[in-house]
Image (cartoon, rainbow, N blue to C red):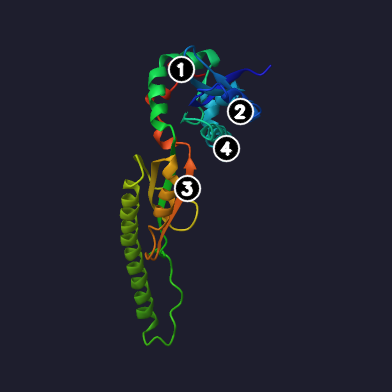
Amino acid sequence: MTATVSYAYAVARDADGSLEEALSGLPGVAEAPVHLVRVEHSDDVVVVSPVPERDFQEAALRAHLEDLDWLESVARAHHRVIQALAARTAVLPLRLATVYLDDERVRLMLRVRHEAFASRLTDLAAQVEWGVKIYVEAAAETERPASPPTDAGLSPGRAYLSQRRAQRHAREDAYRGAEQAAERVEAAARAYAVDRVQHRPQQGELARGPGENVINDAYLVPLQQAEDFRADVMQAAEGLPGVRVEVTGPWAPYSFAALAEAEPLKGTTP
């Protein structure tokens, strides 16, 4: 029989006792069914599922984190469970690949840290997260321009330099436009958002799509104002050539849920 550990997805509020039934049949990481871990006299629960111990031991996990296919599969399952929770109740997502030796260790963590979790769940109730990214899409300065027209009245060399200069000016204008778009986003957010987290701009494989990501923020917005926030922020790039604003969500409040108290207690991970 394969040894397992308990994978913890989130802390959630189960005020009416309906979560267990609502999550019945929902596959988690490694296609394992999810279930709830409870403590006495509390509406708050931890959502967990059993996963193979061999995949989450320190050395194995370090290797798996370099395997993009494995990592994507775990991330998708993790997100699927949290989104199912967020559709029904207040949820405090835990970090990807948070594991405990068994459900009893999860229960101990919940009992010890109940007050911190309960307070944060109250803060996050009826709130959603929107991601806002701003991109500069002007042609990169290092990009080689197209061959200049022969009838431009300039020598090929001077025409080339002129085109390079125009590209640099367009890029400088786009950066200024991105700053203006960021100011517009912040102005719109002041009318709706209750919190903001500034993430590092995405680069490399994380930066999907055209352009350079220069702003990568998350906003916590009351659910009843979520679509108004989105509509206002989507207008932030209007009239700004070379600038694109991307709004994603609404999500469970991943960026606002992290607590030191959510980390496994010493000695609870494989």
Q: Please rate how many residues cluster around mark 1, counting C-alpha atoms within 10 Å: few if below 14, some from 14 to 19, many from 20.
A: many
Q: Position of residue 158 (x, y in %)?
A: 35, 80
Labels 1 and 2 touching (C-beta < 8 A): no
Q: Nearer the viewer, mark 4 or mark 3?
A: 3
Q: Is residue 88 above or below residue 238?
A: above
Residue type of the residue flagged with mark 2: Ala
Give the residue number, with chain letter if any, for mark 4. 76
Q: Is residue 17 above or below residue 147?
A: above
Image quadrant holding the N terminus, namely: top right
Please name which of the two marks, 1 or 2, marks the residue nearer to the observer.
Answer: 2
Percent x, y for residue 159? 37, 80
Q: Secondary structure at mark 2?
A: helix
Q: Which residue is disc 1 drawn over? A: 110
Q: Nearer the viewer, mark 2 or mark 3?
A: 2
The foreground one among 35 and 89 is: 89
Pick whichever of labels 2 and 3 is earlier in the sequence: 2
Cα distance between the residues tagged 4 and 3: 16 Å
Kindly report the distance in space between the C-alpha atoms of the residues bearing marks 2 and 3. Answer: 26 Å
Is residue 102 in view from this perspective?
no
Label 1 to label 2: alpha-carbon separation: 21 Å
Specify which label sits upstream in the sequence, 4 or 2: 2
SS at badge 4: helix
Name the residue that disc number 2 marks: 22
Q: Of the residues shown, which amino acid type is indicated by label 4? A: Arg
Which numbered marker is on residue 248?
3
